[in-house]
Image (cartoon, rainbow, N blue to C red):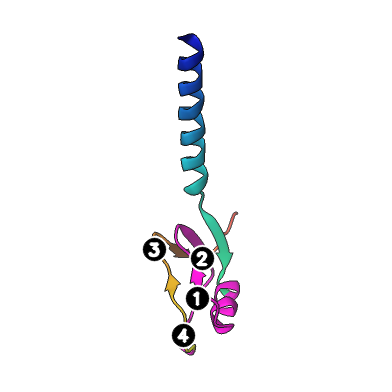
């Protein structure tokens, strides 16, 4: 019985760890984002932070681009 409980606990820990890894916020520079889109590659920027100003107004976007739960902002200046 203890072995079964230990196995179930291990599975729960692995499940929580896997879910936490999928929620990791990725950070990109705006220039990297626009370069990827210019190349016509699919771009998924869900759960990301885009640093610096991102201007896509001059681009022709042919592929799907995702910005769900994305934060757009500048790098904070430390004094």
Q: Nearer the viewer, mark 4 or mark 3?
A: 4
Decide which of 19, 79 is in the foreground and name it: 19
Q: Quadrant of residue 57?
A: bottom left
Decide which of 3, 42 is in the foreground and name it: 3
Residue 52 in magenta? yes
Q: Secondary structure at mark 3?
A: loop
Disc 1 marks which residue?
A: 54
Q: Secondary structure at mark 1?
A: loop
Decide which of 65, 27 is in the foreground and name it: 65
**Quadrant in which the N terminus appears:** top left
First in sequence: mark 2 or mark 3? Answer: 2
Q: Nearer the viewer, mark 1 or mark 3?
A: 3
Name the disc covering residue 62, or none: 4
Name the disc covering residue 68, or none: 3
First in sequence: mark 4 or mark 1? Answer: 1
Q: Secondary structure at mark 4?
A: loop
Question: Above or below — where is 59 with respect to 36?
Answer: below
Tell me which segment is drawn in magenta.
Answer: 31-58
Q: Nearer the viewer, mark 2 or mark 4?
A: 4
Which residue is located at x 51 percent, y 33 percent? 14
Dots 2, 1 in contact, CB < 8 A: yes
- 3D distance between C-alphas at marks 4 and 3: 18 Å
Name the disc covering residue 50, or none: 2
First in sequence: mark 1 or mark 3? Answer: 1
- 3D distance between C-alphas at marks 2 and 3: 12 Å
Q: Secondary structure at mark 2?
A: strand
Quick check: can you spot residue 76? no
Quick check: can you spot residue 57? yes
């Amino acid at each position: 019985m203890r072995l079964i409980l230990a196995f179930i606990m291990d599975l729960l820990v692995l499940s929580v760890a896997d879910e936490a890894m999928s929620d990791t916020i990725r950070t990109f520079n705006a220039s990297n984002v626009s370069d990827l889109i210019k190349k016509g590659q699919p771009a998924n920027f869900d759960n990301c932070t885009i640093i610096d100003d991102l201007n896509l107004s001059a681009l022709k976007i042919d592929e799907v681009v995702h910005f769900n739960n994305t934060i757009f902002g500048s790098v904070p200046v430390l004094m």
